[in-house]
Amino acid sequence: MIVLHSPVETRLASLARAVDRSLDRYLPPATRPPARLHEAMRYSVFGGGKRLRPGLAILACEALGGARAAVLPGACALEMIHTYSLIHDDLPSMDDDDFRRGRPSCHRAFDEATAILAGDALQAEAFGTIARHVRRPALAAALAAELAEAAGASGMVGGQVLDIAGSSKSDEAALERIHRMKTAAMFRAAARMGALSAGAPPAKVKSLGVFGERLGLAFQIVDDILDVSGTAGELGKTPGKDTAQDKATYPALFGVEASRRRAELLKREALKAVSPLGRKAGALVGLAEFIVGRTR
Amino acid sequence: MIVLHSPVETRLASLARAVDRSLDRYLPPATRPPARLHEAMRYSVFGGGKRLRPGLAILACEALGGARAAVLPGACALEMIHTYSLIHDDLPSMDDDDFRRGRPSCHRAFDEATAILAGDALQAEAFGTIARHVRRPALAAALAAELAEAAGASGMVGGQVLDIAGSSKSDEAALERIHRMKTAAMFRAAARMGALSAGAPPAKVKSLGVFGERLGLAFQIVDDILDVSGTAGELGKTPGKDTAQDKATYPALFGVEASRRRAELLKREALKAVSPLGRKAGALVGLAEFIVGRTR
């Protein structure tokens, strides 16, 4: 099979390699005891993720004239948090998924206790990476505050609780709230952390935050469309899980076509937020096109 | 029953109330949605803990002339991390304990998914509290680095992995290693964070770290002795769990008497580390006497 990559895909792949190199540097080596824990952490971190959140952080930073070195610790911290959330989401008492990115999920490859603890350690490592590797203390504190808010009870974790609890009886407002907390908060934080790392003024940080949030909402809708229409091979995880678990999603509530239109609208709102950047926003525009247009 | 409190117990109770007031302020209100998550977080945080780690941080800070306001965010962060670790340790796939501090453990009072997520949110909240509430950014970054190291793969979480894996075949060196990571790392961090919050020079931070680590090792041995000899009413948790789970402990390997002697020795080593502080170490000495002398 010949796969043709668009320029933005090539760019993202290059960013992903840079992120992977830094993750490898920040994370404890797999050989250090307790090896089983470090193996589990690395198994999930290096499990084929697209690195969209760190990619967004880096592109936001570079769009605002910041240096990549300044944003890399925060970018990697975002991916550590994202990875821990996938490990915990897959647990039997949560979404109970045996596969992730085409491989056994962490608790299947190791065991449940190790998976819980690998997730816990990744979260500590995320904040530790920022504290240890961001050179300016004021920036480190600002990035940690952003990340904690996005990852915690008012963001990702809170959204997961609502998602589990509200499964079948959601209306559009409730659904968007879940998406905003569960997914968009981390995209918003990624874009804001990129802007903060570039030393951008508050108004620019805010604009990038809007970009990230709209993009995150669009990402979740596209993800749910792919869950309905994709195969296990394309998705790398069990397809149709949302339907089977009776989870409320955009395609389930409004159908695939209306969901695509909604994702397009969100993308346009995202692009509007960064349009004052002009040509400097080029890579961010490319990222948005890629996320909304992706087929896997 | 008449309970007589020693001066140090009165002091610790007063510190615990101050910590509780700050925890109440830092944590999201129980009424904020998702209420179930915030209720679960508060259920476990306000479940009757002795607040030893925040107490140690505060006493270390005050012994070195620091102000309590400077150390309170870090002190509360330590307690949030400690609480999340108890919630996750109690889970069915880990120690599987239905009781904690005389009440149903979090996953029994709520459910397993909520307990996992409440723990996850508490860890995010811990680092968020430091990032948001510590005024000097350089101190915030230093405290977050200490906490992440103590809580993560090279500390508490790593120790829990070793504890689960190594259950029955431990020798003294392996056992002390588990205790150092699982328990003493957080006590060491508490004492160091207190010293850092007081603006103490590196040599003093190091001495307080030694004090905290030796105290943490002693605490774990006393805890294991109480697990053998205590009743459920005294302990507030299921006694004899360590024996039932065939966990290696000091009393199991060397008997209660040798364990008491070891705890006393560790206490003396702790006191030696802070003896240069003279009378200013009074409260720290009292804390060490209390921890090693406690009967519940």
Image: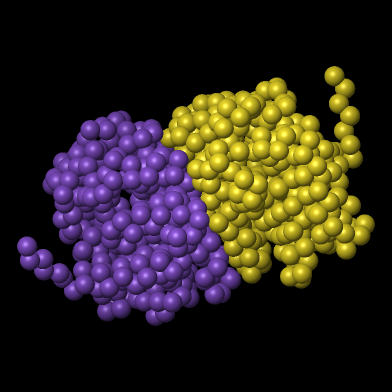
Chain colours: A purple, B yellow
With respect to residue A250, does B67 lie above or below? below
| Residue drawn at point x = 71 percent, y = 48 percent | B216
Where is B132 relative to A172, above or below?
below
Q: Is residue A50 left or right of residue A83?
A: left
The spot of residue B183 in percent (x, y) is 64, 47
Instruction: Locate the C terminus of chain A by quadrant.
Output: bottom left
Where is residue B138, by image quadrant?
bottom right
Q: Residue at x 74, y 65 (%)?
A: B206
Q: Examine the rendered structure and indicate whether residue A219 appears above or below residue A287.
A: above
The residue positioned farthest toward the left in the image shown: A1
Quarter where residue A205 is shown = bottom left
Q: Position of residue A288 (x, y in %)?
A: 25, 64
Residue A261 seen in render: no
Towards the viewer: B204 or A249: B204
> On the rendered structure, is B232 left or right of A252?
right
Q: Residue furthest right?
A: B279
